[in-house]
């Protein structure tokens, strides 16, 4: 069996689809992952065979207007962001189309698995008359808000295929723990989320918990810088003052920038799947792969979300009691570093946050693993 995976968006989509792709390979089937060119290095880093179908990242397709635009102005920022996302993913699907047709002419798949915003996957499966699987790669993807906008943006492509609407998947895979699935979510095949990220040779501090003090890991952010160097130093100082060991996970270029400001603090790239279980608190901006990895480890979170998708993740986790959310838009006169430090102190001193985080981790661990979902994929192609 040949299965084509189509990832659209950031590296989180590659990491989110990788466990199922690996399980397909381990079951003896062939896979290729298609995506935009910037995703190739992330696929290569985790040893997923991948091919570029557009040179541009999703950010190239963002912006107002264009296909799928609405004649009415958005009611609020949330609506505006969902419109922009929907238009962008529609444009990307159209941009990928010719390259995908060339790919499947050389390598015809028996089944197409698309990420939740990979609209080209459903169109391609319809064109090939093979099963289509929609794979939600992480928590709280706002498909109900984005799909109608993308559908309008893809109207010419749909009409060319004789479709009135976006094609329904033959199977929808959802990695959300049951307690965090929103009301009215479509029926889904649940699947356990498994962390997948690049690795390096491990050092003892990465997998061993510190003795006698809590460990707090702060992520600098890949696309969104959560704190400037001076603000990061102040937060680190506040946390070390209450006895915490602080780690700062950052890309190498950011680590070089921050390293001189943070003193005797480990700063740099870290294998999050290994380090997260040793932590008592994670501070981050609700990047999808980061949030899911921390959930799987059963660690409470302090989240500073920058956009409507990350805010949806933050609302879900905070509503469950496994996180605190600090809005990036602070009230005049309030110091964001002080707000974050106070939130960290509350989480570290209140056992309820860890208890709720561990409850989510137990839910995730109880979900079917990717190998069992592969057997479901096999039945789709057999039928």
Image (tube, rainbow, N blue to C red):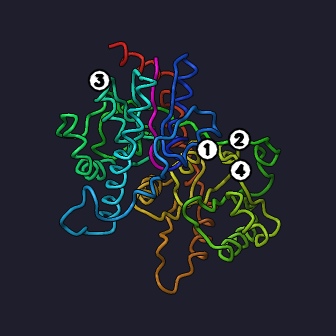
How many C-alpha atoms fall within 10 Å of the one at disc 3: few (<14), some, or many (≥20)?
A: few
- Depicted 76 relative to depicted 1: above or below: below
> Of helix, strand and loop, which one carries label 3?
loop
Position in image of residue 373 (x %, y %): 45, 24
Q: Earlier in the sequence, mark 2 or mark 3?
A: 3
Q: Earlier in the sequence, mark 1 or mark 2?
A: 1
* Residue in the foreground of this view, choosing between 100 and 374: 100
> Of helix, strand and loop, which one carries label 4?
loop
The residue shown at (32%, 55%) is 87
Residue at mark 2 to residue at mark 3: CA–CA distance: 38 Å
* Residue in the foreground of this view, choosing between 192 and 66: 66
Q: Which mark is residue 41?
A: 1
Asked if residue 79 shows in the view, the reply is yes
In the rendered image, which residue does mark 3 sit on?
129
* Relative horizontal placement of residue 202, taking residue 73 as reference (left or right): right
The residue shown at (54%, 25%) is 23
């Amino acid at each position: 069996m040949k299965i084509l995976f189509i990832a659209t968006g950031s590296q989180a989509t590659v990491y989110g689809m990788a466990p199922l792709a690996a399980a397909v390979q381990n079951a003896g089937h062939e896979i290729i992952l298609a995506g935009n060119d910037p995703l190739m290095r992330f696929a290569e880093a985790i040893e997923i065979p991948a091919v570029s179908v557009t040179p541009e990242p999703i950010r190239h397709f963002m912006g107002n207007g264009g296909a799928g635009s609405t004649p009415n102005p958005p009611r609020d920022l949330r609506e505006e962001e969902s419109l922009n996302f929907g238009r962008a993913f529609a444009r990307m699907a159209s941009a990928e189309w010719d390259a995908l047709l060339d790919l499947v002419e050389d390598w015809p798949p028996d089944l197409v698995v698309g990420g939740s915003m990979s609209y080209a996957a459903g169109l391609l499966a319809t064109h090939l008359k093979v099963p289509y699987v929609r794979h939600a790669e992480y928590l709280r993807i706002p498909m109900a808000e984005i799909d109608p906008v993308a559908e309008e943006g893809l109207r010419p492509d749909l009409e060319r295929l004789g479709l009135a609407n976006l094609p329904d998947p033959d199977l929808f895979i959802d990695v959300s723990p049951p307690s965090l699935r929103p009301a009215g979510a479509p029926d889904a095949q649940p699947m356990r989320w498994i962390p997948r990220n690049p690795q390096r040779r491990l050092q003892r501090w990465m997998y061993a918990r510190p003795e006698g003090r809590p460990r707090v890991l702060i992520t600098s952010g890949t696309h969104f810088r959560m704190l400037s160097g001076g603000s990061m130093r102040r937060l680190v100082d506040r946390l070390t003052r209450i006895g915490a060991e602080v780690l700062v996970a950052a890309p190498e270029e950011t680590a070089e920038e921050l390293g001189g400001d943070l003193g005797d603090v480990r700063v740099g790239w870290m294998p999050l799947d290994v380090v997260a279980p040793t932590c008592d608190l994670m501070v981050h901006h609700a990047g999808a792969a980061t949030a899911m990895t921390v959930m799987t480890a059963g660690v409470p979170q302090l989240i500073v979300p920058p956009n409507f998708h990350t805010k949806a993740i933050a609302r879900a986790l905070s509503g469950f009691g496994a996180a605190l959310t600090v809005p990036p838009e602070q009230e005049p006169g309030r110091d964001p570093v002080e707000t974050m430090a106070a939130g960290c102190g509350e989480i570290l001193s209140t056992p309820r946050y860890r208890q709720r985080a561990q409850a989510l981790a137990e839910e995730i661990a109880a979900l079917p693993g990717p190998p069992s979902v592969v057997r479901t994929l096999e039945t789709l192609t057999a039928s």
